[in-house]
Amino acid sequence: MTTLLTGAAVLGGEPRDLAIEGDALVDPSAIDRDRAEVIDASGLIALPGLVDLHAHLRQPGGEQAETVASGVRAAAAGGFTCVFAMANTNPVADTPAVVEQVHRLGLEAGLATVRPIGAVTVGLAGERLADMTMLARSAARVTVFSDDGHCVHDAELMRRALEHAAALDAVVAQHAQDPALTRGAVMHEGPLSAELGLGGWPSVAEASIVARDAMLAELAGARLHVCHVSTAETVEVVRAAKARGVRITAEVAPHHLLLTEDLVRSYDARFKVNPPLRTDADVRALREALADGTIDIVATDHAPHAPEAKLTAFADAAFGMVGLETALSVVQMAMVETGLMDWAGVARAMSTTPAAIGREPGYDAPLEVGASAHVVLVDPAARAVVEERHLRGRSANSPYLGRELPGRVLHVWHAGRRTLADGRIVTEEVGR
Ligand SMILES: NC(=O)N[C@@H](CC(=O)O)C(=O)O
Ligand SMILES: [Zn+2]
Ligand SMILES: [Zn+2]
C-alpha cells in the first residue's frame, strides 16, 4: 500500500510531495501513482512524528487517571509517534518486570512507540540505586533514567547514577527541586504567593540543583538531562554549563512557554503543576532559550490526574496537567506565531533531538526519502477552543479548557501505519 501526500509544506518549507510505502518514505516520483491513495496536503505542514521524552502514562497503578492504551491515544491525537513513559508508577519502574510490562502494553496498544523510563533509585525513595544495568539490558532496553516527581537529592547517589548511565550510554533525567527549599510549596514564590497565602517554590530550588548536577555530570563524563526547566535562573545555569562543554540537555514543558502564575489567582487546581507556573520574565527567558538552543527540546510532562485529585483546595490538590493533545498547538502559539522559531526548529525540538537524547532510532533524517515513515500533517490555520471532547486520554486536567489555541493535527503515520485520520484515531491499530 502506497500513500501519496501532495503539496505539503515539508518542515514548513516549499510544498512538495511525500510518499509512504510500507514503513518508509520513498521517492514520490518512483511510485505507481494510479495505485496510490492520494491525500491532498496543500495548505498543511508536514512534520516528522513527534517524540515526547517526558510523559506520565500512569500504568501500572494509576489506571483511573491514564493507561498506556489511553495515553497513546492522547499521543496520536497530538501528533506523537513515540512517548517515553515516566517511572513514577505503582509499582515503580525500578525492575525489569515493570519496564517490560509497560513496553509490552505499548506494543499491544499500537498507535505509538512506548519507551519506558527506568527509575534511578529503588521505589523513587532516593536511598539506593535501582539496578540500572539490568533495566538497560531488559527487553524494554531502557536508555533514560529518572526519579521524576522526586529529585535525586543525595549528591553521592546522583554521582553514581551518572557514572552508571555513562557506562550504559544512557542519560539521567533530573527533576531538579531542592526538597528542603520547597517544603509546603504549591506555587511560584514571590509577591503573588504571599498575597494568596500559598506556599512558595523559589527559583533557586531548581537552579541550584541543576548547577550541582552539571558539575557532577562533568566529573562523571556523563549525559545529564534537565526535566521541565521553569525559570530564567536555570536557563543561565544551563547556558554556562553548555559553554563549559558539559554534556547537558534541557527540556521545557509547553505550559511553561505560555502560562504564568497569575492563573493561580483563580485557586483552580488545573493550574497547579510542578515546577509551578512562573512569571512573564521567566516565560520570555524560556522562549528565548528554546529559540537559541540553550533549551534543547519541548517535552509535555503530560500528568493526568483523576477528578478527585484536582477537586480539592488548591494547596491539597495533585500537581500536574495533561499536555499530549495540546503540545504542538501551544508551541505554535508561543514560538512560531511569535516569530521565535520556524517549523524546522519545531521539528528539531519535538522530534529529532528528543529521539537523539533517548537513543530512539528512526528520527535522524526527518521526512527524507528512506527514513522511517513517522509523519504528521498539521493545519496551521485552524483555530479552536479546547474542549474536553478534544482530549483523548482518560483525564481532562488541562489548563487550556475554554482557551482558543491555533493549529490542528489532522493526520499521523507511525512507521507507515495511519494512527490519526482527519483528527480521528484509527482504531485498527489497537491490538495489533
Ligand atoms: N509535573 C507534575 O506536576 N506532576 C508529575 C510529576 C513531575 O513531573 O514532577 C506527576 O507525576 O503528576
Ligand atoms: Zn518532574
Ligand atoms: Zn513529570
Image: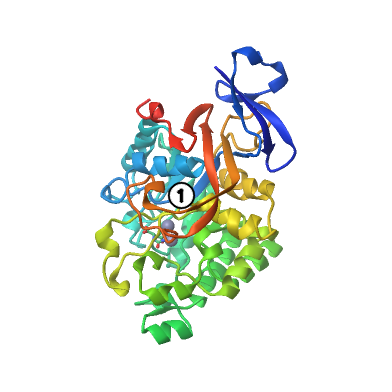
Image quadrant assignment for residue 157: bottom left
**Residue 336 location, x and y as percent?**
65, 55
Image quadrant assignment for residue 237: bottom right
The C terminus: image quadrant: top left
Residue 52 is left or right of residue 235, and the answer is left
Return the residue nearer the eye: 256 or 337: 337
Residue 117 is left or right of residue 254, and the answer is left
Seen at 37% across and 80% down, the residue is: 199
6, above or below 69, in the image: above
Q: Secondary structure at mark 1?
A: loop
Query: Can residue 431 be seen here?
Result: yes
Q: Which residue is mark 1?
A: 324
The N terminus: image quadrant: top right
Return the residue nearer the eye: 432 or 419: 419
12, above or below 202, in the image: above
Ligand 2: image quarter = bottom left
Seen at 53% across and 67% down, the residue is: 230
Q: Amino acid at mark 1?
A: Leu
